[in-house]
Amino acid sequence: MIEGLKKEVKHLLSRERWEHTQRVVEMAGQLLANHRYPLDPQRVQTAALLHDCAKDLSLSGQLKKAGDFGIVLTSSDLLCPQTLHGPVGAGMARHMFGIVDRDILQAIALHTTGGPRMTALAKIIFVADYVEPGRHFLGVDKLRTLAEQNLDEAVLACMNHSLAYLLRRGNLIHRRMIAARNYLLAIKLYPGSREEG
Ligand SMILES: [Fe+2]
Ligand SMILES: [Fe+2]
């Protein structure tokens, strides 16, 4: 199944995006092996392979797909269109590739912003996408080391890094990203708390 999926996804992506996708597959596999989550490696590979399947569509193409798949877009989705390929990619995975595994779909949908109540699979994809070896930015080595040590801390640190970047540039921030960070941070600071997502 994975080999067939690889061929189909490759056709949807630019060369650079396909290379990035392969690195995310590799990195996600490493994180899974490191942290020994009881997850089927094939599910991790599937989510990693498909995570950017919508990214090379034009914005109008992504909006059209969102309409076709009945994806309800929020004002944040429209104000932060660079995040749209997450939910649209999950729609493509569901409707074009027949993926029904909810955790795989969640991991694809949330890989750009994160979200409250991320599964281990979603965390692995989020972090693998952020620190795969093709990423070159100040602080990435520290994030990679953290990713090997503590996945939850790595998710938070990647979110902090991403938010700091968006703030520096004066960009809009998707509210799901704020909610995701609040959720993770509340659990960390106040174990047992039930931060609303
Ligand atoms: Fe992406
Ligand atoms: Fe990506």
Image (cartoon, helix red, strand yellow):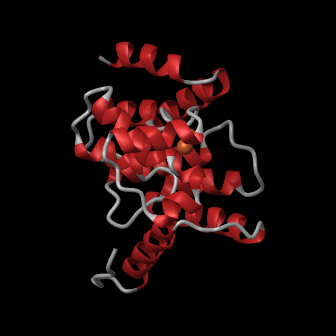
The foreground one among 149 and 166 is 166
Q: Is residue 109 left or right of residue 174?
A: left
Q: Residue 8, percent across and down?
A: 43, 16
User: Residue at (63%, 62%) from the top-left corner?
Assistant: 162
Ligand 1 falls in quadrant? top right
Number of labels in the image equals: 0
The quadrant where residue 164 appears:
bottom right
Q: Residue 176, percent across and down?
A: 45, 67
Residue 12 vertical placement versus 102 (above, below): above
The foreground one among 9 and 181 is 9
Quarter of the figure with the C terminus? bottom left
User: Residue at (29%, 32%) from the top-left corner?
Assistant: 95
Residue 130 vertical placement versus 17 (above, below): below
Residue 110 vertical placement versus 89 (above, below): below
Quarter of the figure with the N terminus? top left
Q: Is residue 194 visible?
A: yes
The quadrant where residue 41 appears:
top left
Q: Residue 127, percent across and down?
A: 51, 50
Residue 121 vertical placement versus 150 (above, below): above
Q: Residue 144, percent across and down?
A: 61, 50
User: Residue at (46%, 46%) from the top-left corner?
Assistant: 86
Q: Is residue 34 visible?
A: no
Q: Is residue 12 left or right of residue 170?
A: left
User: Residue at (45%, 13%) from the top-left corner?
Assistant: 7
The foreground one among 156 and 54 is 54
